[in-house]
């Protein structure tokens, strides 16, 4: 009997219209040699296995909507050689899975995983304001602030000509070697943050923590994951006060947890990033008093740790 090498895990909550588009995209792949696990924390459960009989699909009811726990549920039960995560609001190019598996099969031992090029859609012109914000806050082409180099990209920025090394991966598309993520994938401190409704950036924390232990990732330039970000945002994150705490406190905690070397600049880089990225160039936040209250509460918490 042929043994499949890849399991794709999709954490979700109450977003069936979005996840159906992803599943249709997975049906169109040039190969069907993979398993799919949906870790579903929806309040009103809909059986997707019936609607997609061509896919090797298992849907698991999960009674605790907590993104890190849902990801780790997949880590704990996966039996294939590779494990990939998709956000539920993406679609992918038809050769995406074939390219991912081929790369992982040929990669060296120090490669923990890979991701494809991520495009935010629908396409829109990047304003001068946005360009300035990205330069000032440290986001430029492939960079996410000064904490680490990641594989998230915007559609009108230059795509690399070759595959590039990245220090962490972003939630829309993350593929790992299973033995490595099983060893380092259970971040209990992050589970606890999400239980308190202040968790943010669990994808960076997960891949960044593995990177901290000396492993690398590749961003594959010839396949694309289309991220439908408009009207999105995590269904797990609360808005207002708790989101403000999350943006300032939990992201700072993540930066400290994944930093290879904790120096003064690194310690306060999250303030530089968040201050310019959110408070200077995102004017609508100033109208959300509860968000600002939470943001400064998060700064106080960070000062104490």
Image: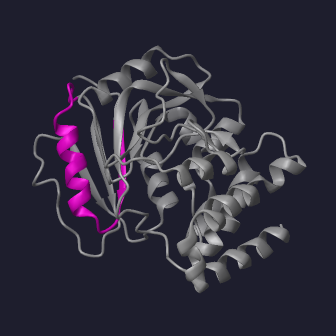
Identify the residue at the far front of this view: 128
33 left or right, relative to 65: left
Q: Position of residue 32 (x, y in %)?
A: 20, 30
Q: Position of residue 217 (x, y in %)?
A: 56, 29
Residue ID at (59%, 85%): 290
Q: Position of residue 185 (x, y in %)?
A: 57, 46
Identify the residue at the far bottom of this view: 289
Q: Which residues are magenta?
A: 7-32
Front residue (pair 263, 161): 161
Specify whether residue 216 is in view. Answer: yes
Front residue (pair 239, 211): 239
In the rendered image of this protein, does residue 294 appear above or below residue 211?
Answer: below
116 left or right, relative to 179: left
How many numbered circles does the render carry? 0
Q: Position of residue 242 (x, y in %)?
A: 58, 78
The quadrant holding residue 166 is top right
54 left or right, relative to 26: left
Quadrant location, the C terminus: bottom right
Q: Is residue 13 magenta?
A: yes
Residue ID at (54%, 80%): 240
127 left or right, relative to 125: right
Front residue (pair 57, 238): 238
In the rendered image of this protein, does residue 172 appear above or below residue 31?
Answer: below
Q: Is residue 10 magenta?
A: yes
Quadrant location, the N terminus: top left
């Amino acid at each position: 009997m042929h043994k499949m090498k890849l399991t794709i895990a999709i954490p979700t909550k109450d977003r069936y219209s979005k996840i159906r588009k992803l599943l249709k995209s997975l049906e169109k792949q040039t190969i069907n040699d993979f398993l799919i696990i949906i870790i579903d924390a929806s309040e009103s459960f809909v059986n997707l296995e019936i609607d997609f009989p061509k896919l090797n699909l298992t849907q698991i009811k999960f009674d605790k909507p907590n993104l890190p726990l849902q990801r780790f549920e997949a880590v704990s039960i996966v039996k294939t050689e590779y494990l990939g995560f998709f956000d539920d609001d993406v679609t992918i190019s038809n050769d995406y899975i074939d390219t991912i598996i081929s790369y992982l099969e040929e990669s060296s031992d120090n490669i923990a995983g890979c991701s494809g090029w991520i495009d935010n859609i629908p396409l829109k012109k990047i304003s001068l304001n946005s360009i300035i914000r990205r330069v000032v806050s440290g986001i430029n082409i492939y960079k996410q602030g000064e904490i680490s180099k990641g594989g998230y990209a915007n559609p009108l920025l230059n795509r690399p000509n070759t595959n590039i090394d990245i220090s962490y991966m972003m939630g829309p598309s993350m593929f790992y070697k299973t033995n490595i993520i099983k060893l380092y994938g259970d971040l209990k401190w992050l589970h606890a943050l999400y239980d308190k409704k202040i968790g943010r950036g669990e994808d960076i924390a997960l891949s960044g923590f593995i990177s901290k232990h000396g492993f690398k990732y590749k961003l594959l330039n010839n396949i694309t994951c289309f991220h439908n970000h408009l009207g999105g945002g995590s269904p797990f994150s609360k808005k207002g006060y708790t989101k403000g705490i999350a943006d300032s406190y939990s992201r700072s905690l993540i930066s400290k947890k994944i930093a290879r070397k904790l120096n003064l600049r690194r310690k306060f880089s999250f303030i530089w990033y968040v201050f310019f990225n959110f408070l200077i160039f995102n004017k609508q936040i100033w109208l959300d008093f509860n968000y600002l209250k939470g943001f400064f509460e998060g700064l106080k918490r960070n000062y104490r740790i």
